[in-house]
Amino acid sequence: MRALVTGGAGFIGSTLVDRLLAEGHAVEVVDDLSSGRLANLADARADLDHDFSFHQIDICDPNVVELIERSRPEVVFHLAAQIDVRVSVEDPVRDARINVLGSLNVLEGARRAGTRKVVFASSGGTIYGEVDPEDLPVGEGHPQHPVSPYGVSKKVVSDYLHTYRELHQLEFTSLALANVYGPRQDPHGEAGVVAIFAGRLLSGEPCTIYGDGEQTRDYVYVDDVADAFVRAAERGSGLLCNIGTGIETSVNELYRAMAENAGVDTPPQYAPARPGELARSALDAGRAGLHLGWRPFTSLKEGTAATLEWFRSTQG
């Protein structure tokens, strides 16, 4: 398979790139390095046996359409995005420019290239909005009422994918990701708290929890997510599939687990809650199991331990 990965120098994207190359696929990466890092692609770039190339370009640049058209990928994995909910609240125009208009450039490039399928990184943590506790974990049939511009932008792109499928026969699968965490993670974005806690716990700095810490999230490990993307290249066409564990974990519980693993007994600090953030979130991934043959295989204990170990290694 010839694949193109937007946002491929990012935390999730680079993990997917490594997985695709390990399976023998040809991979091109598009990333403007605004948040992604070339260091994340060190293995991909170093192995001369890999069919791999990198293009530093913003998906908002109209030239990205021609680049994708020339590359003629069979599958486009679209992960490039503005990923910070708080940034989207503060600057919704910028969020829409990157996440909506930039995504349209990617879709246009895929259409012109004759691409078979786009696999899109949507956001299960934001597109459904506030969900009644009795509806958790939430399924894909739940109404989508995002409460942040970031969630709105992800919903809009999924709508465009449906339109491109009807108008241009461009297949797609949207993966509504829970809060993804793991090695290479950036402190920004939906599960950035894991990276923030890891860095601060290992350096002996205090950790701050916003709100009372009882807000919950569904934390899913990055290797499990990369597996879902690879599966979606061949399955689940025309579907939105949740990718999560179905387990709610509060920020307080997350802190206690990570602090214990890091050998820290200092309590966290608390600060006022931030606007645009959900009180509770968890995803029912039954559809992904049925249509993608996917399930999460990494426990939170195993995943946070691996993440802490990676941060230790990067701190020397």
Image: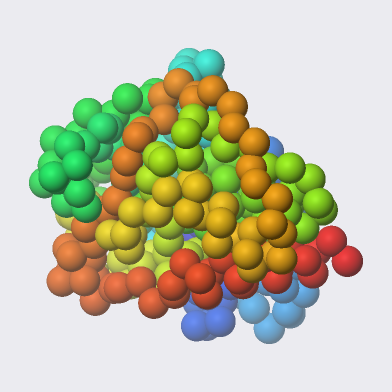
Q: Residue furthest right?
A: 316
Instruction: Say above or below: 251 vs 115.
Output: above
Q: Residue at x 79, y 69 (%)?
A: 313
Q: Residue at x 32, y 41 (%)?
A: 280
Classify residue 142 by image quadrant. top left
Please give left or right for residue 163 compared with residue 247 in the image: left
Classify residue 192 by image quadrant. top right
Dividing the image into 4 quarters, which one contains the N terminus?
Answer: bottom left
Q: Is residue 200 visible?
A: yes
Image x and y of residue 189, in percent? 54, 41
Instruction: Say above or below: 169 vs 44.
Output: above
Q: Is residue 40 visible?
A: no
Closer-to-camera residue (4/259): 259
Image x and y of residue 156, in percent? 29, 31
Q: Residue at x 82, y 53 (%)?
A: 203
Image x and y of residue 165, in percent? 19, 47
Image x and y of residue 222, in percent? 50, 64
Q: Residue at x 68, y 38 (%)?
A: 34
Closer-to-camera residue (209/11): 209
Closer-to-camera residue (114/77): 77
Closer-to-camera residue (184/298): 298
Please give left or right for residue 94 compared with residue 268 in the image: left
